[in-house]
Image (cartoon, grey):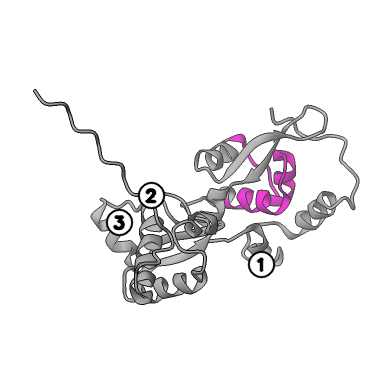
Amino acid sequence: MGRPKKPEASAPFDPELAELPEPLRWREWMGRVEAAIFAAREPVPRETLAVLVGARCNLDALIEDISAELRTRPYALVFVAGGWQMRTRPHYAAAIRAANHGEARAAGAPDLTPAEMAALAAVAYLQPATRAEISRLAGKEVSRDVIARLKRLGLVDGALRAPEPGAPFAYVTTRKFLEAFGLVSLRELPDLERPEEEGLLQPAASEAALDLALGYGDNPEDRADDQ
């Protein structure tokens, strides 16, 4: 009985591809980058993609060429939450739901009630924010159930404790929040007036709460304990 063959050592990964003619090298880089983004569950950052191509590769130009080739496809390459991601175009949402018994892959914003949307908007603008602060900015009491659902959806995180009596949880938005709403960073949040105009926040409460968050107001003596 012969000895089992040793597995052949795989060739080291070559990002440069110097032996290929320039056009073929560019196409191979495009394929690598597109494949890596396609296979990823989360947006792929520039640093990750940079290891797939040569040091002299213009990654931005490469991404533009991939995006151009996808213009006629039902999905697009988008930059969101600090990285690139493949997303199906909104036009095909109905077809995707029909093929999945009425459900679509949770890539975009989930269905939220007005109370949940108001609470999420308050967290986004005040973070880190306690439930009492969220309630003031939303203009009405925000229940623990509302916060709990936002946490289950992965849109907010309550790992922080506010430095105040009772040490209530202070909530922040997550990377999934950026992904769900197609934001590159929190700097892309619209001006506060827009959520107010759309009825997501109460203007009177918003101004006072923002003054407090920025340190212009007095801290209230009685804050709700959210432990």
- Tell me how far mark 1 sits from mark 3, CA to CA: 30 Å
Q: Residue furthest top?
A: 1
Q: Residue furthest left?
A: 1
> How far across and how far down the image is residue 95, in percent?
27, 62
- Tell me how far mark 2 sits from mark 1, CA to CA: 52 Å
State the residue in front, 36 or 140.
Answer: 36
Seen at 74% across and 60% down, the residue is 203
For disc 3, the neighbor class at 10 Å (few under 14, some 14 to 19, many from 20) is few
Q: Which mark is residue 123?
A: none
> In what element is the residue under mark 3?
helix
- Please identify the quarter of the rendering in which residue 31 is found: bottom left
Callouts 2 and 3 close, C-beta under 8 Å: no
Seen at 70% across and 45% down, the residue is 134
For disc 2, the neighbor class at 10 Å (few under 14, some 14 to 19, many from 20) is few
Total marks placed: 3
> How far across and how far down the image is residue 86, in percent?
40, 61
State the residue in front, 220 or 177.
Answer: 177
User: What residue would you read off at disc 2?
Assistant: 12
Q: Earlier in the sequence, mark 2 or mark 1?
A: 2
Q: Which of labels 2 and 1 is toward the front?
A: 2
Q: Earlier in the sequence, mark 1 or mark 3?
A: 3
> How far across and how far down the image is residue 196, in percent?
68, 63
Q: Which mark is residue 194?
A: 1
For disc 1, the neighbor class at 10 Å (few under 14, some 14 to 19, many from 20) is few
- Inspect the image, locate mark 2, and give the three-letter code of the amino acid beneath it: Pro
- Whether residue 187 is in magenta: the answer is no
Tell me the magenta residue range.
117-144
- Tell me how far mark 2 sits from mark 3, CA to CA: 42 Å
> In what element is the residue under mark 1?
helix
- Inspect the image, locate mark 1, and give the three-letter code of the amino acid beneath it: Arg
Q: Which of labels 2 and 3 is toward the front?
A: 2
- Inspect the image, locate mark 3, and give the three-letter code of the amino acid beneath it: Arg
